[in-house]
Amino acid sequence: MKFSVRKVLVAFAAISIITLPLKAQTADAHAQAHASASAQAHTQAMEIHKSAHESAMDNHRSALEEHNRAVERFNRAFRDFEEDNLIEERISASRVRKMKKVTSYISLPANDANIRYTGRTLAASDGSVSFDWSGTYLEVTFTGGYIAMRISDTKKNYYNVFIDGFPAGTVETFGKDSLIVLAGAPDKREHTLRLQKRSEGEQGTTTIHSFELAKGGKLIKFEPGRNGLIEFIGDSITAGYGTEAKSKSEPFKAQTENCNLAYGAIISRYFNTDYTFIAHSGRGAARNYGDTARVSKNSMKERMMQTFDENPAHRWNFKTYKPSLVVINLGSNDFSTKPHPQKEEFLGAYSIIIAQIREVYGDVPVLCVAPPKGAAFDYLQSFCKEKGDKNLHFAAYLNGVYGGDGDLGASAHPNYNGQKKIAMNLIPYISSIMGWELTGKAAR
């Protein structure tokens, strides 16, 4: 058989044309297989990684939950420890608080030199001591376990009683001649008494005539070791109006007014200072709440100079004490209802207040606290800046610092929770002004 060369070449070319596409198809199939295998491997690796990550996160969450449970167990144990100790102390205080009149006692005048009064008081020649400003308090150490006071009141007031530093209830004062037992379980230990007026001067003037002790008991001067004294000049917020009321819809009642839960007392406890409250609900610097005149005849600029809130007959002896700091919180009532005082009328009255402080206390630091809203904020800010007094300072707690239902007591005044928020806003200002260190403890 014979083949021509030309026919062979043509045949070979035809075979080559058929073979080349088959090789390309094989390469593509290989690439696709490789890509598919890589994708599967990658997916499997990601699933393994995801599973490992989720497992690790589960372990982390379990460890974190166990840590939180351990922290809560510790905190619960610590609270139980504190509560046990507090209960023990309160039991100790309650033992001496039992109301029991002793049959054999000694009587000492209310102005006994060992009784420490803080606030504006007036001692009479018969040994009695009278006062009416909110927050006035006395402190003394006594022995014998029993102490009572013979007392009278022009109206009806409420007092906080503290024995050995712990609350021991409240007492009411009224009538011309009452004997109130403050602690009545005779023993041989020393105890401290603190009696604090929690209601305002308009509720009446209290006169303590004498104290009774168990026979053989004695009074010992109480030395509190405090860091100074802050005088707070203000209105209802300073006086603690409605701090114990359950809701903002409650009307005012003297029973729910407690200055010990107001921002001034909270700040003083934080810095371990004494305090005086020169405060009266509804009063302003120039104009009192609801007055039909732009300038009231008897605002806080007059009352601040008096021994008694409700009696202008006695000017206070300002040599009796000198505060380390004066805090003024006025202006809300000036602009709460119309007619509002004009700017020069408001600042004119405020200037008198500052001048009187400088007259009686000298160059002490003064912190002017502006109300959270209204014209007084702008007026006081510019006043303090333009006065040129290096010891005159401006502060404010802005609108919204307190105001939720949980912050409000009687007639929408701040309750204890709201008062704590005010105090926490003012504490840094006072720290900076006075150089008193922030302690890190709770403001309460």
Image (cartoon, rainbow, N blue to C red):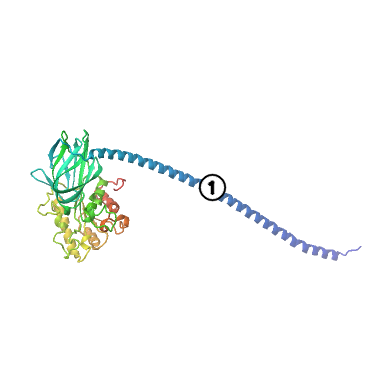
Residue 114 rendering spot, x and y as whole percentages: 15, 39
Residue lying at the far left of the rendered structure: 125
Residue 81 rendering spot, x and y as whole percentages: 35, 39
Asked whether residue 190 appears in the rendered view, the answer is yes
Disc count in the image? 1
Residue shown at 13% from the left, 61% from the top: 297
User: Which residue, given by chain and number where applicable, does mark 1 sit on?
Assistant: 55
- In the rendered view, tell whether residue 255 sits above or below residue 109: below
- Report the front residue among 148 and 292: 148
- Report the front residue among 126 and 119: 126
- In the rendered view, tell whether residue 331 sits above or below residue 145: below
Left or right, 50 with respect to 211, comes to right
- Report the front residue among 66 and 377: 66
Amino acid under disc 1: Ser
- In the rendered view, tell whether residue 388 sits above or below residue 225: below
Task: Label 1, secondary structure: give it.
Answer: helix
Residue lying at the far right of the rendered structure: 1
Residue 210 rendering spot, x and y as whole percentages: 13, 42
Asked whether residue 367 appears in the rendered view, the answer is no
Neighbor class of circle 1 (other Cα within 10 Å; few <14, some 14-19, many 20+) is few
Splitting the image into 4 quarters, where does residue 221 fall? top left
The quadrant of the rendering that contains the N terminus is bottom right
